[in-house]
Amino acid sequence: MKEDCLPSSHVPISDSKSIQKSELLGLLKTYNCYHEGKSFQLRHREEEGTLIIEGLLNIAWGLKRPIRLQMQDDREQVHLPSSSWMPRQPSCHLKEPSPQDSNVTAQEPSTQPEHKAESSRDSSGPLEEDEEAPQLMRTKSDASCMSQRRPKCRTPGEAQRIQRHRFSINGHFYNHKTSVFTPAYGSVTNVRVNSTMTTLQVLTLLLNKFRVEDGPSEFSLYIVHESGERTKLKDCEYPLISRILHGPCDKIARMFLMEADLGVEVPHDVAQYIKFEMPVLDSFVEKLKEEEEREIIKLTMKFQALRLTMLQRLEQLVEAK
């Protein structure tokens, strides 16, 4: 069932399934009541008769193999002119300060202690040159002029502050020593999505958020229930809709990011036995074997009775001739 063929009263779950809009809105109301007062509440609107839900989607890491973060980042590199790190040249080689620079220089002596001012009056010529050095350091340098011509250039403090704002996985930022690592199993992250985004689009958004080199085709999203049941989301499904359908509680059902080749679907019939201990499972196997033997005996006796009946009938036909 394609989206274009759906009536306005239905919302697609996948290419072949849909749900009534009123039913989905009822589930959405329950979802928002559960997350009341939190940032995980979902908003909805309608555009041209299409219901669109948007908000944060929690996704837990369930990887068994390490992932690699990108070497390059979107942060700009800070280029500091060499003059800002070089010692100041003598005053005879400096350009004449601008009027604004003179004001800055003129205000400096007033902030110095009085005993320094008195010592500067009694000092000789070489000492006067030493007195001018700290004042010259406070005037506009070549680096400041350069920063005016290049407004995108940032100071080291700003660059460090921007670096802190980069997304991290459980506090892990990229560096060359730990660029390859495995996120802690079960740790949760979130991305802002809407109900029109497919599984592949959500995977791409999540990997781009953390600058992961691996492509989205190498991963899959799974719904893992408390019982151990595990269902893989198809590429044509909508993860946010699936989250609403499975309820708001992460303890009952969680969405995991796993490797596409390592993740295995676990049906409900199998999941109900996963959490049992081995002795209990062995007893189940023994009972199943006993039941199997009883069924074999029943079938054997049944076919022997049928065989005897057929032989008797054949004998009657032969005697009748």
Image (cartoon, rainbow, N blue to C red):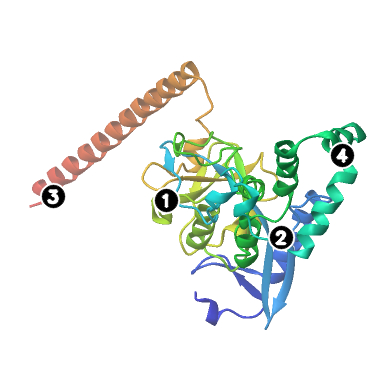
- Height in image: 81 above or below 294? below
Of labels 3 and 1, earlier in sequence is: 1
Instruction: Look at mark 4 in the image and give the residue it sits on.
Output: 112
**In terms of secondary structure, where does tag 1 sit?**
loop
Badge 1 amino acid: Glu
Q: Which mark is residue 97?
A: 2
Of labels 3 and 2, earlier in sequence is: 2
Of labels 3 and 4, earlier in sequence is: 4
Q: How many marks?
A: 4
Q: Nearer the viewer, mark 1 or mark 2?
A: 2
Instruction: Look at mark 1 in the image and give the residue it sits on.
Output: 213
x 37%, y 24%: residue? 289
Give the percent coordinates (x, y) of residue 12. 58, 70
**In terms of secondary structure, where does tag 4 sit?**
loop
Give the percent coordinates (x, y) of residue 163. 60, 47
User: From the viewer's perspective, is 306 left or right of 219?
Assistant: left
- Height in image: 241 above or below 222? below
Q: Nearer the viewer, mark 3 or mark 2?
A: 2
- Height in image: 79 above or below 150? above
Instruction: Look at mark 3 in the image and give the residue it sits on.
Output: 317
Badge 2 amino acid: Pro
Distance between mark 3 and mark 1 Cα atoms:
80 Å
Q: Nearer the viewer, mark 3 or mark 4?
A: 4
Of labels 1 and 2, earlier in sequence is: 2
- Height in image: 8 above or below 86? below
Of labels 2 and 4, earlier in sequence is: 2
The reply to whether discs 4 and 1 touch (Cβ–Cβ < 8 Å) is: no
User: From the viewer's perspective, is 155 left or right of 202?
Assistant: right
